């Protein structure tokens, strides 16, 4: 209790150290979105500085989220020289509100070039400032948005804040129609579950692929994988428990309510989940969770891997984005209550989500795409690349009733008898769980399960907020004109339940049949990141984002360019790393092994002419043919990588990287992994899967 939030300039601290009027004015901005008075900023800055210095801070930084996928910071000391050769510690309102990083050095998709480079960071007072301790160095971090000199968003926070405002505006319209006059804002809330791997640092340092790309580009499967299902929820070793507790303490100090931790399905895989909060803060917190997981690991001689697929053959990592919407006075709009069939307001918001997900499923799919996730979506460990919604028995039944005229009843869960008299009778949920659905209703929220483990959750939530703002606005348009509210609402819900029934699917999302069925239903199936990216430039997308003021056409074009560029660049890095390791580590080891075999044959034969050397000869034959296959594939990879770099059109280039470079990397790996299976373990130059996954 004492350490929770100790490093956060939170509401309690602000109340304590700000003059009453300043506190009130700031609160008004945070709660109601009113514009901040610069005079207020000066007072806040001064209080923030005193608080941070007391914590040992020497520097401050604007902390922002450019389109690199990681956070960015530039530290400035508080010092300001005085005439007598000394310094005083200063921090002005201007420095709090605005920073000026060079925008051309961050991904900007052509919006900023080096000769017109200016960009700004702007204080986001809705996410509290905090101090971070890095090996005793304390820095005041101010969450900020980042935009170009011309006002376009160059980060992940700006569109998120805009989408939250859009959703709030539309949802309030709808609430008023239902007679709600108390709520003033509607807030989307998120609780992201974060998966990650831990390996011993000594192995990591010997793997160029892990260091440069975050995943293993080589590695034969270990004799044991996850088939015994003994890792999931298994008991946590002392070393990992100590690590997890260290992580928790760091997060609690930052005011992040880290709550749940457990072992995940794959060997070496774990999960952490905080308690949900406002989407904007949850997004900042998730970035801090990822950073903290990585930093603290090093202290324990470990490395935390956040990549979606660090190891082939065992499960990869994702993030479950639990999303809901609630009012500023605490009403969860996706809470069905005991008898959802009588809860018209809930059913209306539910229908808005269903319609939104069906109409904009491609945008949602895109928001969960990156090179790492291409290894997972559609493979039998993560949801398929097709978006569908799981509602469960109770709500599916109500949707059916809606289609048939009007809901009259709600299926109830009842009691679960375990059959042992000493065990309690358990109240049963009204519906079972479905782990295979990409978008599942889980009681009072939706769980979007496609999100990549390393990606900011901003993107998926921008999409969710915006598409739901859109469908809510269309519903409000209709109902505001209603002659007979109840009759019109009933007709509208029937229409949505009928027109969007195709997106509802409660069955096994991992099955072949579902892929065929989804195709029959006409649901989009975007198999890879590259296929999903052009969704950004569709007329429908531009119209949607412009209508709600979330992203304009220029910003969408810039994001399209950045996405393609980042895809191509990351595959290029993987290809060059593959070549580096194959040529300088794996091939030489294999040749040495073949030479040893040849030497053995000669030596043995020289010592005893009649000696049986067929084992060595067979092995030599096998090794030599794999070596030549490896070399051929290396040459091929070299050629296609060079060709890829010469393709000028960004989209064509990404396609080439996917179809040629990525595929050839797999061929290089295949020969290398086969060699790993026969080459003398003492000669093998890189740590194996058995070591990395099990020696912890
Ligand atoms: P699971 O059974 O899906 O693994 P967890 O307990 O690991 O569930 O995670 C559930 C997450 O959902 C938590 O982060 C929790 O805070 C979050 N959550 C609960 N209610 C809401 C809500 N109304 N809005 C957003 N997230 C929520
Ligand atoms: Mg979980």
Image (cartoon, rainbow, N blue to C red):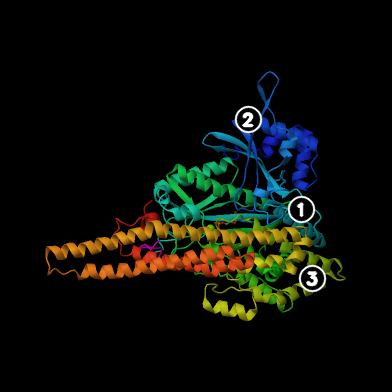
Tell me residue 389's x, y (percent).
Answer: 62, 70
Tell me, yes or no, whether the two marked residues, 2 and 3, touch with CB atoms within 8 Å.
no
User: Mark 1: is the Cβ under 8 angstroms from ligand 1?
Assistant: no
Question: On screen, 238 above or below 83?
Answer: below
* 593 vs 231, nearest the viewer: 593
Q: Is residue 226 magenta?
A: yes
Circle 3 — which element?
helix
Labels 1 and 2: the sequence-earlier one: 2
Residue sitting nearer the eye, 160 or 90:
90
Q: What residue span does the magenta drawing correspond to?
A: 219-227
Quick check: can you spot residue 465?
no
Position of 92 relative to 609 (above/below): above
Q: Which label is found at residue 656? A: none
* 355 relative to 61, above or below: below
Question: Around disc 3, counting alpha carbons within 10 Å, would you say few (fewer than 14), some (14 to 19), or many (20 or more)?
Answer: some
Q: Nearer the viewer, mark 1 or mark 3?
A: 1
> Which mark, residue 53?
2
**Quarter of image, res 137:** top right
Instruction: Give the labeled residue for mark 3.
Output: 489
| Res 185 label | 1
**Element carrying mark 1:** loop
């Amino acid at each position: 209790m004492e350490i929770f939030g100790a490093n956060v300039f939170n509401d309690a601290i602000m109340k304590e150290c700000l003059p009453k009027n300043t506190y009130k004015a700031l609160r008004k901005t945070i709660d109601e979105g009113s514009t901040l008075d610069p005079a207020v900023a000066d007072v806040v800055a001064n209080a923030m500085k005193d608080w941070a210095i007391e914590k040992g801070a020497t520097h401050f930084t604007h902390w922002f989220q450019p389109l690199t996928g990681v956070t960015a910071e530039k530290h400035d000391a508080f010092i300001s020289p005085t005439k007598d050769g000394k310094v005083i510690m200063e921090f002005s309102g201007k420095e709090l509100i605005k920073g000026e990083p060079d925008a051309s050095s961050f991904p900007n998709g052509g919006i900023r070039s080096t000769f017109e480079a200016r960009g700004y960071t702007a204080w986001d007072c809705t996410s509290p400032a905090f101090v971070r301790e890095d090996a005793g160095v304390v820095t005041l971090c101010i969450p900020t948005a980042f935009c170009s000199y011309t006002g376009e968003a160059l980060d992940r926070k700006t569109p998120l804040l805009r989408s939250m405002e859009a959703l709030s505006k539309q949802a309030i319209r709808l609430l008023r129609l239902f007679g709600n006059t108390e709520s003033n804002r509607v807030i989307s809330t998120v609780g992201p579950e974060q998966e990650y791997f831990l390996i011993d640092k000594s192995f990591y340092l010997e793997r160029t692929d892990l260091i440069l790309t975050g995943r293993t580009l080589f590695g034969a499967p270990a004799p044991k994988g996850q088939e015994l299902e003994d890792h999931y929820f298994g008991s946590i070793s002392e070393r990992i428990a100590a690590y997890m507790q260290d992580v928790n303490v760091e997060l609690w100090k930052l005011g992040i309510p880290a709550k749940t931790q457990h072992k995940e399905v794959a060997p070496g895989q774990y999960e952490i989940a905080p308690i949900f909060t406002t989407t904007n803060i949850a997004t900042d917190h998730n970035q801090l969770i990822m950073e903290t997981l990585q930093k603290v690991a090093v202290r324990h001689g470990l490395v935390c891997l956040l990549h979606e697929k660090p190891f082939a053959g065992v499960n990869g990592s994702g993030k479950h984005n639990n999303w809901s919407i609630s009012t500023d006075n605490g009403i969860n709009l996706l809470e069905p209550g005991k008898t959802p069939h009588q809860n018209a307001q809930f059913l209306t918001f539910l229908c808005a989500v269903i319609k939104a997900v069906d109409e904009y499923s491609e945008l949602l799919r895109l928001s969960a795409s990156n090179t790492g996730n291409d290894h997972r979506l559609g493979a039998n460990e993560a949801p398929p690349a097709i978006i569908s919604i799981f509602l469960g028995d109770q709500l599916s039944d109500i949707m059916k009733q809606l289609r048939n005229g009007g809901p009259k009843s709600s299926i109830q869960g009842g009691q679960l008898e375990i059959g042992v008299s000493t065990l309690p009778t358990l109240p049963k949920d009204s519906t079972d769980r479905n782990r295979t659905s990409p978008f599942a209703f889980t009681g009072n929220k939706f769980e979007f399960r496609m999100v990549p483990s390393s990606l900011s959750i901003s993107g998926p939530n921008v999409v969710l907020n915006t598409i739901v703002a859109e469908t809510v606005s269309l519903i409000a348009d209709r109902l505001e004109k209603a002659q007979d509210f109840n009759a019109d609402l009933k007709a509208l819900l029937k229409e949505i339940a009928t027109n969007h029934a195709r997106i509802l699917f409660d069955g096994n999302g991992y099955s072949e049949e579902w892929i065929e069925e989804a195709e029959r239903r006409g649901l989009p199936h975007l198999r890879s990141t590259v296929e999903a990216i052009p969704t950004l430039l569709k007329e429908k997308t531009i119209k949607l984002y412009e209508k709600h003021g979330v992203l304009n056409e220029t910003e969408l074009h810039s994001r399209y360019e950045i996405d393609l560029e980042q895809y191509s660049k990351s595959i290029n890095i993987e290809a060059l790393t593959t070549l580096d390791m194959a040529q300088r580590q794996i091939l030489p080891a294999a040749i040495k092994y073949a030479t040893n075999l040849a030497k053995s044959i000669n030596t043995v034969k020289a010592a005893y002419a009649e000696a049986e050397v067929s084992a060595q000869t067979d092995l030599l034959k096998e090794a030599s043919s794999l070596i030549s296959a490896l070399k051929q594939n290396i040459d091929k990879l070299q050629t296609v990588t060079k060709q890829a770099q010469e393709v000028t059109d960004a989209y064509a280039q990404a396609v080439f990287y996917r179809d040629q470079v990525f595929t050839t990397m797999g061929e290089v790996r295949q020969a290398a992994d086969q060699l790993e299976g026969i080459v003398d373990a003492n000669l093998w130059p890189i740590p194996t899967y058995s070591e990395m996954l099990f020696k912890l």
